[in-house]
Structure formats: C-alpha cells, structure tokens
Amino acid sequence: NNDVLSKHFEILKDELATVVLIWTWPFGRQFDLRSCSSLYNITGCRLTSDRSQYPKAHGVMFHHREICHNLPSLLTIPRSPLQKWVWMNMESPANSPRLPGPASLFNLTANYRRDSDVWVPYGRVVEASNDDKAFKIPNKDKLVCWIVNNWNDSFWRVKYFNQLSNHIKVDTFGGHFGRYLSYRDYFKTMSSCKFYLSFENSIHKDYITEKLFNPMISGTVPVVLGPPRANYEEFIPADSFIHVNDFKTPQELAEHLTYLDQNQEMYEQYFTWRKHFVARRSDFGVEHACRICDHIKQHKGYRVFKHLNTWYWG
Ligand SMILES: *[C@@H]1O[C@H](CO)[C@@H](O)[C@H](O)[C@H]1NC(C)=O
Ligand SMILES: *[C@@H]1O[C@H](CO)[C@@H](O)[C@H](O)[C@H]1NC(C)=O
Ligand SMILES: *[C@@H]1O[C@H](CO)[C@@H](O)[C@H](O)[C@H]1NC(C)=O
C-alpha cells in the first residue's frame, strides 16, 4: 500500500533529518519552519520551536536579543557533547548589549560578518535571470532621498546629512520627519529618487544592511556611509554605488550629484552591473535557521567558538 509506504518513508526521513531548535523567535517574529527546501534548496533539515525537542536537537539557535539579559539561566541547562549551540545576531556591536558569558559557551556563530561560521549577509548580488535582465531604470521625480526613523545627533550619518543638506535638496521621509511610509510606499518612494542615502547607523566591518540593498533592488543609486569602499567592493560591484569617502567634503559630494543629475549618460553608468547581476535581500530568521542546519549537517566535527565577547565587541 503506497500510503503506508510513504508514511514509513516520512518517518524515516524525519529520523535521519538534522534537527535545529529555534530557542526563541528572533524579536518574537515567527516564520514557516518548513521552508528550507522551497526557499534555499536545503533538504534533510527539520526546524522546530518546540523545546521538548531539545534533547534530540543537533543544533540550537540562540538569538542574541532574547538571551543577552538572561544568560545565567542558559548556563544551568544540561548539554550533550554532540549538540552545537549557535549564537545568532544581525545587529551591529554598537546596537547589541555585550554578552559577558563564559569564553566557550557557543560552538558556532551566525552573523553578517564574513568570518562567521554561518554567514548571512543582509543581501547579496547574484547572477541575473533573463527576467531580471529586462530591467529599466524607474521614472525619477526626486534627486536625493533619505528615509530615517532612528535619529541621534551623535550619529555620524546625522552630522553628515546636516552638512550635505546645506548644499543639495534632500527629500526626507520616515518617523523622524513625521512622514512615516508604509512598506509599499517605502519601495515606491525609493525608486522615484535618483539617489538614496544608504547611511548606516554605526560603522563596522561588513555591516552593510538593507539600507544598501533596498535601493539597489528599487533601481536607485545608493550613496553609502559605512565601512570603507574596499569593504563594500567585496560584496557589490565598484560602479554600482557612490561612497561619501570618495569626496573630501559633503559639498563636493553634493556638486557631484548635481552634475550627475544633468548628465543622464553618466548617471546610467551606475546601472551597468544590472546587465549581469541583480540584488536580493536575505530573509531574517528563517534563512539563518536553514543555513545553520545545512552547516551542521555538513560539518560533523567538534567545534567551539572561543571568546565571542572580544571577537564581536573588541
Ligand atoms: C538542489 O540541490 C540538489 C543537490 O543537493 C541539486 O542537484 C539541484 O540541482 C538543486 N536544485 C536547484 C533548483 O538549485
Ligand atoms: C544618542 O547616542 C548617545 C551615544 O551613543 C546615547 O548616549 C544617547 O542615549 C542617544 N540618544 C537617543 C535619543 O537615542
Ligand atoms: C560545543 O561546545 C561545548 C562547550 O564548549 C562542548 O562541550 C561540546 O562538545 C561542543 N559540541 C560540539 C559538537 O562540538
């Protein structure tokens, strides 16, 4: 009987699967536990958020924000020598409370940093499909835009913006300016601007967030403030963006943007990369869990990640 057979097959598959326990939903946001195969072609994985499965789990994913304030409770949990504990975090060191834990609490790290065991950047530039190649630069009715909620006068980006906006008109949106945008309007607004200020809230190696990838996806040229240009160029084409460090002063940057506004041909050069590539955003949480599972499945060896505290916070 085929039904019985396929049921047995399902049970067997389940027993052979690599199990990853999601200790807490990251920021309380749930995701579909069965999407590893459809989203990433990762098979042989079983994700669960059921803590009664803890003894069976090959790996446990701990999201930083939910554990950083109750570390002592983690230290009392019995651990199998074969189980891997994974520290997961996407916030920069400046936005993450330190974790004053023991030096060898975790076995693996899952982070935006290129040197983490399970690397999940905020987005990727990947080979374009034929559909992607039909790309046309969207219609523009604004020159420079910025959408910002989290404003702090001590941020680099705020200081830079204050100077830049003396020399060029910047259309500003977001909570700070009392012009909150819905998710749909966010992308529509972004694509109607020639340039977008992809200013990171803090500056760290490899900390290149959706503030860069969203304009790249929307057909807008990002003007970046973050780690040095060379760090960006490891992940995105050199001619796809403008770096504030390319100019001596905010005024010189403003002059360059004004010049590009009047030279359509020069402006279009910033989209040359779209002939071959397209930008994609990562999925928060589910992508980490699936890639952690895949990593554990393929790396059975003993591994301890020493000194997370100094690695991340210095
Ligand atoms: C999915 O992965 C398998 C091997 O694990 C490979 O043979 C297959 O081509 C992949 N499918 C896609 C759509 O990438
Ligand atoms: C702004 O940043 C400073 C320094 O990091 C911090 O002390 C202050 O609390 C922040 N202010 C706001 C309103 O977030
Ligand atoms: C994970 O790290 C712990 C603590 O250092 C260790 O006891 C355990 O054996 C490690 N597990 C694996 C599979 O490497």
Image: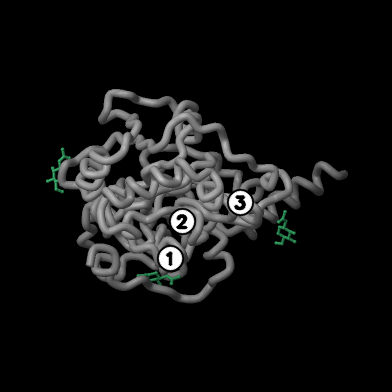
Q: Which residue is mark 3?
A: 274
Q: Are marks 1 and 2 in contact (CB under 8 Å)?
A: yes
Q: Mark 2 is on which residue type? A: Pro
Task: Tell me if residue 122 can be seen.
Answer: yes
| Disc marking residue 297 | none
State how far apart marks 3 and 2 are (Cα): 20 Å
State how far apart marks 1 and 2 are (Cα): 8 Å
Which quarter of the rendered picture does the N terminus lie within? Answer: top right
Q: Is residue 252 or residue 134 the one in the foreground?
A: 252
Q: Is residue 59 or residue 266 the one in the foreground?
A: 266
Q: Earlier in the sequence, mark 3 or mark 1?
A: 1
State how far apart marks 3 and 1 are (Cα): 24 Å
Q: Which residue is mark 1?
A: 114
Q: Which residue is mark 2?
A: 121
Q: Are marks 3 and 2 in contact (CB under 8 Å)?
A: no
Q: Mark 1 is on which residue type? A: Arg
